[in-house]
Amino acid sequence: MSEEPVLVLISCDPRDSGRAFEAMRIGVGVVAGENAVTFVLTGPAVHLLDADTDDLVDGDDIAKFRENLKRLGVPFHVDAGSVPTDPDWNADGHPVVRVTRDQITELVRGARRLLVF
């Protein structure tokens, strides 16, 4: 496994677009290929971790892929300024690393490849 990860940066709103799930799906495929992957959620993409996936485009699939990532121990790096105050956010207890914008910049700089959605 290469030391530099592939970074999947998701900023699309999963309540309005299937692109957020597509980014997650592609990232899971990269993980399955035994590559290090860092997922970063910014802005409305943090809703990928909403407890109620009924309001999300591809909500059932999002829940399945989140569970796969959780089982693999792959955390979501989440822009700390975008984390909702809703107590149901991340109710499944997915591993989350809260990061600042500066830390996101460093993650981008340290990545081998970038996928931006």
Image (spheres, grey):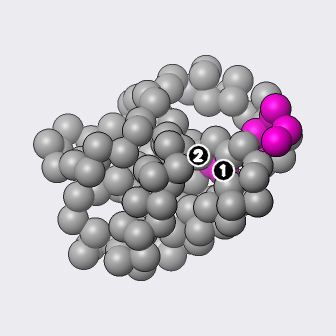
* Residue appearing at x 48%, y 73% in the figure: 17
Residue 112 in percent (x, y) is at 85, 40
Residue 43 in percent (x, y) is at 45, 46
Rendered-image quadrant of the N terminus:
top right
- Left/right placement of residue 52 relative to residue 66 reads left
Residue 13 among magenta residues: no
Q: Is mark 1 in CB contact (under 8 Å) with mark 2?
A: yes
Q: In this view, does 76 lie above or below 71?
A: above
Residue 30 in percent (x, y) is at 72, 59
Crowding near the residue tagged with mark 1, few <14, some 14–19, many ≥20 C-alpha atoms within 10 Å: many
Q: Residue furthest left?
A: 87
* Residue appearing at x 66%, y 50% in the figure: 8
Q: Callout 1: helix, strand or loop?
A: strand
Q: In this view, does 116 lie above or below 112?
A: below
Q: What residue type is labelled 2?
A: Phe
Of 34 and 96, the residue lying toward us? 34
* Residue appearing at x 62%, y 30% in the figure: 104
* Residue appearing at x 36%, y 67% in the figure: 63
Q: Can residue 68 be seen in this view?
A: yes
Q: Callout 2: helix, strand or loop?
A: strand
Q: Is residue 44 above or below residue 85?
A: below
Q: Which mark is residue 8?
A: 1
- Left/right placement of residue 56 relative to residue 31 reads left
Identify the magenta region: 1-9
Q: Residue 39 carries which label?
A: 2
Residue 106 in percent (x, y) is at 70, 24
Q: What residue type is labelled 1?
A: Val
Residue 8 among magenta residues: yes
Q: Distance between the residues labelled 1 and 2?
A: 5 Å
Q: Can residue 15 be seen in this view?
A: no
